Image (tube, grey):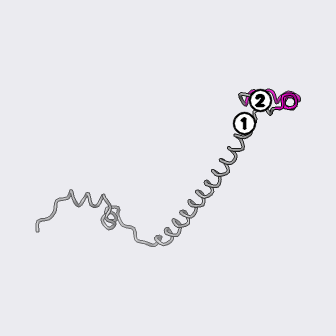
C-alpha cells in the first residue's frame, strides 16, 4: 500500500487485511511497520537524552541555590562599582574614555 491513509481505509472494513495476507501472501504496509519500529527507537533515545538534559538543568539549579544562600548576606554595591571591582568590559570602557588626570 502506498500510503498510510489507504491502509487505514482498507483496515476499516471487516477482514480485508487478513484476506489480502492470505490470498496474496503480503502484509500491506510492512515497510511502515519497520519505520514505526525505527521511530520508536529514535524516540526512546531522545527520551533518554531529554532525561539527561533535565538532570543537568536540575544540578545547575542546585548549584545556583547554593550560591544564592552563600551570597545572601553579601553587601550590595552599585552596578558601576561592581563593574569596576569585577573588571568587566563596561568598567574598562569607562576608564578608557574618561579623561586621565595629569601626573
Q: Who is closer to the viewer here, 28 or 39?
A: 28
Verify whether residue 14 appears in magenta.
yes
Q: Residue at x 77, y 29 (%)?
A: 7
Which span of residues is magenta-colored? 4-25
Verify whether residue 20 appears in magenta.
yes
Q: Who is closer to the viewer here, 48 or 76?
A: 48
Q: Is residue 2 left or right of residue 101?
A: right
Q: State which quadrant residue 78 falls in.
A: bottom left
Real-space CA distance between mark 2 and mark 1, rounded to the nearest whole angstrom: 10 Å
The disc at residue 7 is: 2
Placement of 56 over or under 41, stated as above or below: below
Could you tell me which secondary element the residue under label 2 belongs to? helix
Q: Which residue is mark 1?
A: 32
Badge nearest the viewer, 2 or 1: 1
Q: Are marks 2 and 1 in contact (CB under 8 Å)?
A: yes
Q: Residue at x 78, y 31 (%)?
A: 28
Q: Residue furthest front?
A: 25
- Magenta: main secondary structure: helix
Amino acid at each position: 500500500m502506498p500510503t498510510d491513509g489507504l491502509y487505514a481505509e482498507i483496515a476499516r472494513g471487516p477482514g480485508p487485511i487478513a484476506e489480502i495476507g492470505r490470498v496474496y501472501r503480503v502484509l500491506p504496509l510492512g515497510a511502515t511497520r519497520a519505520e514505526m519500529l525505527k521511530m520508536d527507537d529514535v524516540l526512546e533515545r531522545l527520551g533518554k537524552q531529554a532525561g539527561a538534559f533535565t538532570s543537568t538543568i536540575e544540578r545547575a539549579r542546585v548549584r545556583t541555590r547554593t550560591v544564592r544562600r552563600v551570597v545572601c548576606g553579601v553587601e550590595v554595591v552599585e552596578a558601576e562599582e561592581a563593574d569596576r571591582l569585577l573588571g568587566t568590559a563596561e568598567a574598562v570602557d569607562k576608564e578608557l574614555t574618561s579623561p586621565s588626570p595629569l601626573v
